Amino acid sequence: MGGGAGGNFGNTYGRRTIYNGTTKSAALKNVNQLPQNIRKSTKSFFKGSSNNYNNYSIVKNKNGTYTVTMENPGRVPGSKAVYYKIIDGDGKTIRVYKETFDPKGNLVHRKEK
């Protein structure tokens, strides 16, 4: 990733990916390499998934918060649900929600958890 003006990362609007993985076991294994303040919250979020989930990621946002995501492939081929957890710099949960997408990639609905 390249640095942009004002310390932003190129084409990421100030976001920086700090973890990307495809399995629950790998995501849980890598929790200990995350910043100390978000480990507990991230681990509990990932533990709530089944082994069917994929595409686990953690992004540090420009404002100091973290966006933790995981994907659950849908029963209809190509559909999916993406779960989000927003964590502040102190490790406190700000928001948890789910977005459901149809096979064409259209947002079907967003639900607060």
Image (cartoon, rainbow, N blue to C red):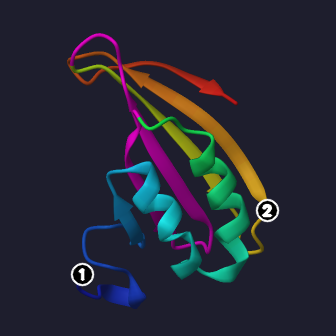
* Residue 60 visible: no
The residue at the point 66 percent across, 70 percent down is: 39
Q: Position of residue 80 (x, y in %)?
A: 35, 25
Taking 97 as reference, is 104 left or right? Answer: left
Q: Is residue 3 above or below residue 34?
A: below
**Which amino acid type is marked by label 1?**
Met
Q: Name the disc covering residue 92, or none.
A: 2
Q: Name the disc covering residue 1, or none.
A: 1
Taking 34 as reference, is 113 left or right? Answer: right
User: If the image is split into quadrants, where does the N terminus sit?
Assistant: bottom left
Q: Position of residue 6 (x, y in %)?
A: 41, 89
Q: Position of residue 66 (x, y in %)?
A: 58, 65
Residue 80 vs residue 6, the one in the foreground = 80
> Counting residues from the N terminus, which is met first, the one under dot 1 or under dot 2?
1
Secondary structure found at label 2: loop
**Which amino acid type is marked by label 2?**
Lys
Q: Is residue 59 above or below residue 105?
A: below
Secondary structure found at label 1: loop
Location of residue 67 by image quarter? bottom right
Q: Is residue 113 above or below residue 17?
A: above
Residue 15 vs residue 18, the one in the foreground = 18
* Residue 39 visible: yes
Magenta region: 52-77
Q: Position of residue 84 (x, y in %)?
A: 55, 44
Q: Is residue 55 magenta?
A: yes
Q: CA distance from mark 1 to mark 2?
A: 28 Å
Q: Name the disc covering residue 32, or none.
A: none
Residue 14 vs residue 49, the one in the foreground = 49
The residue at the point 69 percent across, 52 percent down is: 44
Q: Is residue 89 above or below residue 95?
A: below
The residue at the point 62 percent across, 67 percent down is: 65
